[in-house]
Amino acid sequence: MNNLETHVLRLIGEDISSPDVFVDTTAGIAQIRASLNDGIQELCMVTGSYRRTYLLALLANRVFYRLAPQNDYLGYIVGAMDRQKRRRLVRTDLTALTCQDPWWLKRTGPAIQYMQLGTNHIGVYMAPSTKGIILELDCVMIPKPYAADKDPVKVRSQFETAAVYFAVSEFYASRGDAKRAVEYHAKYIETAGLSALHPMTADRQYRFGGQEEKPVEVPPA
């Protein structure tokens, strides 16, 4: 067990030195590990805290590309830049690009815009006429689940406790203890700083000021 799993077991009342149920050979620890992986992936996706640079080599007259990160899943692309010219590309989408230029699939030239399509595809506008252009993609990544004690856990240290609370919440939910599940899920949201995504009240707009004063007519003398 790693430190995060040990922390979860302490919070649910398991004996760490001599565990009864949650030992490495039982399905119980697999449940805790799966919950931790779920919490870590959600934290990385929502907060955008796990980012990597993906280098994409553009080909001549090629518009669409499939991204294939090796060790993680692609969450979303934050920005793209032409590595040689040090020029950032503008983000767009299919609808906006079609309205802007109906013949955009036939255009060639320097890539000036990009669009993300689905989970692992990207398109560029315009398609380069020659190969050799490298795009630097600033990507928010979602780590693949860790499977063993010695596997690296790809989460920032300030979110480790939040991931633990997430796993504890799921544990109590699986046992039918809704009260404790809600309690630890609230701790998860608070510790991770996700309260802005779960507001307690609806957004309101306030306007201060009185009525506009009308000019007073002075009768002639």
Image: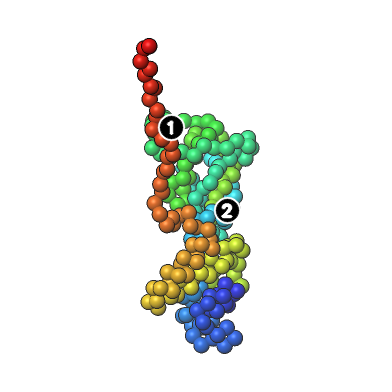
Where on the picture, by quarter, is residue 146? bottom right
Q: Front-most of 153 and 61?
A: 153
Residue 45 visible at all: no
Position of the C terminus by quadrant: top left
State the image coordinates of residue 214 (x, y, percent, origin top left). 38, 25
State the image coordinates of residue 205 (x, y, percent, origin top left). 41, 43
- Please tell me whether mark 1 sits on a helix, a strand or a loop: helix
Q: Front-most of 6 and 127?
A: 6
Where is 189 relative to 85, above or below? below
Kindly give the residue lying farthest to the top in the view shown: 221
Specify few, some or many for label 1: CA neighbours under 10 Å numbering under 14, 14-19, or 20 or more: some
Query: Which residue carries the number 1 mark?
Result: 104
Residue 81 visible at all: yes
Give the CA distance from mark 2 to mark 1: 31 Å
Q: Front-most of 11 and 134?
A: 11
Color encoding of the figure: rainbow
- Please tell me whether mark 2 sits on a helix, a strand or a loop: strand
Where is 31 relative to 77, above or below? below
Tell me the residue at 38%/33% (across/down). Answer: 211
State the image coordinates of residue 164 (x, y, percent, origin top left). 53, 70
State the image coordinates of residue 144 (x, y, percent, origin top left). 52, 63
Where is 151 relative to 60, above or below? below
Query: Which residue carries the number 2 mark?
Result: 51
In the figure, is residue 203 to the left or right of 13?
A: left
Q: Which of marks 2 and 1 is in front?
A: 2
Tell me the residue at 51%/62% (across/down). Answer: 190
Amino acid type assigned to the residue bearing label 1 in the image: Trp
Tell me the residue at 47%/51% (across/down). Answer: 120
Tell me the residue at 55%/50% (across/down). Answer: 139
Specify few, some or many for label 2: CA neighbours under 10 Å numbering under 14, 14-19, or 20 or more: some
